[in-house]
Image (cartoon, rainbow, N blue to C red):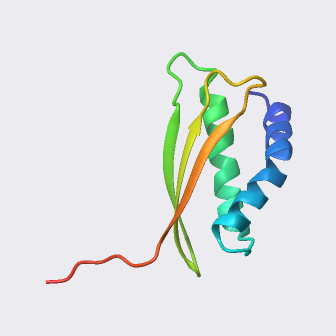
Amino acid sequence: MSSTQSTELRSRLLPQAVALVERALGGANDSQVVEALLDACSFLEESAQSDAPIVALERDVRTETGTYHLFIRRLSSSVPAGKFQILITCDLASGLIY
């Protein structure tokens, strides 16, 4: 994927990514989570052009408000290309007790 195509994809996905992150974070807009989401979508779209495409990935984003888990899957039969299924969860608490 050329840099122009990547820029166009990110521009097209940006408003939807911001809205999804705001919904997941209870109205807050965290640019770090939005940027991670757009990076992942761009990576998956680039990978689709290869001989062995990656169809899904998971990524953790640590911010001041918590750790967010991004699960992103590229829909391979999407027309136009570049449609993704996304799940954002928040790690409210985790640890080891004994």
Which percent across, then down, holds residue 16?
79, 51
Relative horizontal placement of residue 97, taking residue 34 as reference (left or right): left
Relative horizontal placement of residue 37, taking residue 93 as reference (left or right): right
Foreground pick, 84 / 43: 84
Q: Quadrant of the N terminus?
A: top right
Identity of the residue furthest to the top in this view: 51
Which percent across, then down, holds residue 50?
58, 20
Residue found 82% across the figure and 31% down from its top: 5
Residue found 69% across the figure and 25% down from its top: 78
**Looking at the image, is 10 positioned above or below residue 45?**
below
Relative horizontal placement of residue 27, taking residue 47 as reference (left or right): right
Residue found 51% across the figure and 54% down from its top: 59
Which percent across, then down, holds residue 92?
45, 77
Foreground pick, 5 / 69: 69
Which percent across, then down, holds residue 72?
56, 44
Foreground pick, 3 / 47: 47
The number of callouts visible is: 0
Q: Quadrant of the C terminus?
A: bottom left
Identity of the residue furthest to the left in this view: 98
**Looking at the image, is 98 positioned above or below residue 13?**
below
Residue found 78% across the figure and 37% down from its top: 6
**Looking at the image, is 7 positioned above or below residue 46?**
below
